[in-house]
Amino acid sequence: MTDHDAVPAVVPDPAPDPAAMRKHYREEGLAEADLAATPVQQFARWFRQAATEGRLFEPNAMVVSTADADGRPSSRTVLLKQFDEQGFVFYTNYDSRKARDLAENPYVSLLFPWYPMARQVIVSGVARRTGRDETVAYFRTRPHGSQLGAWASAQSSVISTRVDLEASYAELSARYPEGEQVPVPPHWGGFRVAPQSVEFWQGRENRLHDRLRYVARADGSWRVERLSP
């Protein structure tokens, strides 16, 4: 092959430069006088707006960050399934990495990344397993396929191929067809995160964001402090 016959090298398009990315945040801010009496009440206000504005695919999606006994962190997205003054609840496989981390170190962080609204909520607290009755009651509300999935997936474990996972699901589907009650897996259940602090972050112009944080007092009341952005 002569030089003029050589195939030209393909030069990939350069990746976007993250340092050049800029977004202008809203003028509307968050003032101490606007806050609800408790962080859960304030969360309910923002969650209602996140759920009704229609710009968020899953407003109850949150990043759950844990650390094991050696302090090695890990994060993943999980769906919030309940919240009240007692805490924030999600469900998982108790053999998963997050559950193993929480068994060794119950301190956890929940991050709600509501980017289209230029908002985020950060919950820091302690996770404890929910009671079995509460777990069973929630499991019964899950779609049939999700109930089977809780059995089919040994969450966080290494598998050879997806075929193995789908074969396990198919076997369970034949054993428990639609309309037949699926037993609750003994290795599956909930965690309730009792908040020790909850930060509400509102994006503002010129990166002068509003950050207001509720901090729990020993008597059960809350102190509110403003953080520098």
Image (cartoon, rainbow, N blue to C red):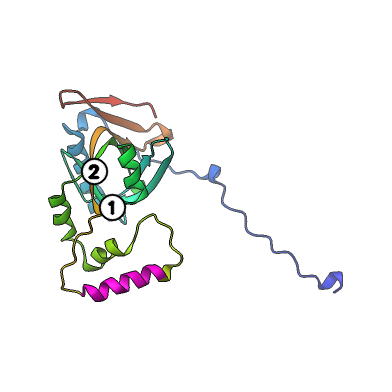
Q: Residue at x 42, y 34 (%)?
A: 207
Q: Position of residue 69 (x, y in %)?
A: 38, 36
Q: Which mark is residue 46?
A: 2
Q: What secondary structure is marked by label 2? A: helix
Q: Residue furthest front?
A: 186
Q: Quadrant of the N terminus?
A: bottom right
Camera-side residue of 94 and 24: 94
Quadrant of residue 85 within the rendered picture: top left
Quadrant of residue 27 within the rendered picture: top left
Magenta range is 164-177
Q: Residue at x 21, y 75 (%)?
A: 177
Quick check: 113 above or below 136?
A: above
Quick check: 101 above or below 148?
A: above
Q: Quadrant of the C terminus?
A: top left
Camera-side residue of 196 and 189: 189
Instruction: Pick whichever of labels 2 and 1 is earlier in the sequence.
Output: 2
Q: Position of residue 57 (x, y in %)?
A: 31, 57
Q: Residues within 10 Å of mark 1 (few under 14, many from 20)?
A: some
Q: Is residue 121 visible?
A: no
Quick check: 159 above or below 20?
A: below
Q: Is residue 160 visible?
A: yes
Under mark 1, the amino acid is: Thr
Task: Provide the residue designation for mark 1.
Answer: 92
